[in-house]
Amino acid sequence: MSGFGSAPYGSGPMGLGVPETAPIPPEGPVGCRYINPATKDFEVDPDTGQLKQMPPERQQVLLALMTLARSSTAPELRNFGITMPRKMGDNFQASMVSAVRTALRDLTDRQKVIRIDSVKVEKGAGGRARTTVTYTITRTGKPDAPLTL
């Protein structure tokens, strides 16, 4: 009694057909998924249908500034993220600058991935604030696009 079917495994017509071309690889910085700072979602490139890409340093900065400290249940990540000031009082701007620098300390001091050039905090109407962080990627020596949160 031979095997299952009429042809030995691997010699039948399976896998034969018309070849299909692979999708176009993404252009631009490759390696990390693009995170939209406003929506905090990944985005798809409408031309290629693939996830957009961003430099790894920008993704690390975004994750550090968008994650609230002590929000993780993992013990090793308990101090990762930013501790936001509780009130928008007289010293809010100084507190926010300190919070941003503290959140990015691992990237600036330990890993030495970035160098912070400036942190600007603007208080707006209705209890809203806008924080803009400009930094330089140490690997390239070039400033990255400013991040506004």
Image (tube, rainbow, N blue to C red):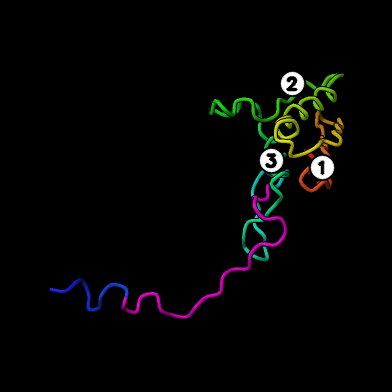
Q: CA distance from mark 2 to mark 1?
A: 29 Å
Q: Would residue 146 appear left or right of 21 to someone viewing this image? A: right
Mark 2 vs mark 3: which is more N-terminal? 3
Figure quadrant of residue 130 = top right
Closer to us: mark 2 or mark 1?
Answer: 1
User: Measured from the top left, where is residue 140 in percent x and y?
Assistant: 79, 48
Q: Which of the labelled discs sits on residue 60, or is there none? A: 3
Closer to us: mark 1 or mark 3?
Answer: 1
The reply to whether the magenta stretch includes residue 146 is no
Q: Which of the labelled discs sits on residue 27, or is there none? A: none
Residue at the disc numbered 1: 136
Q: Secondary structure at mark 2?
A: loop
Q: Are marks 2 and 3 in contact (CB under 8 Å)?
A: no
Q: How many numbered marks are there?
A: 3
Amino acid identity at mark 2: Arg
Q: Which of the labelled discs sits on residue 86, or is there none? A: 2
Q: Secondary structure at mark 1?
A: strand
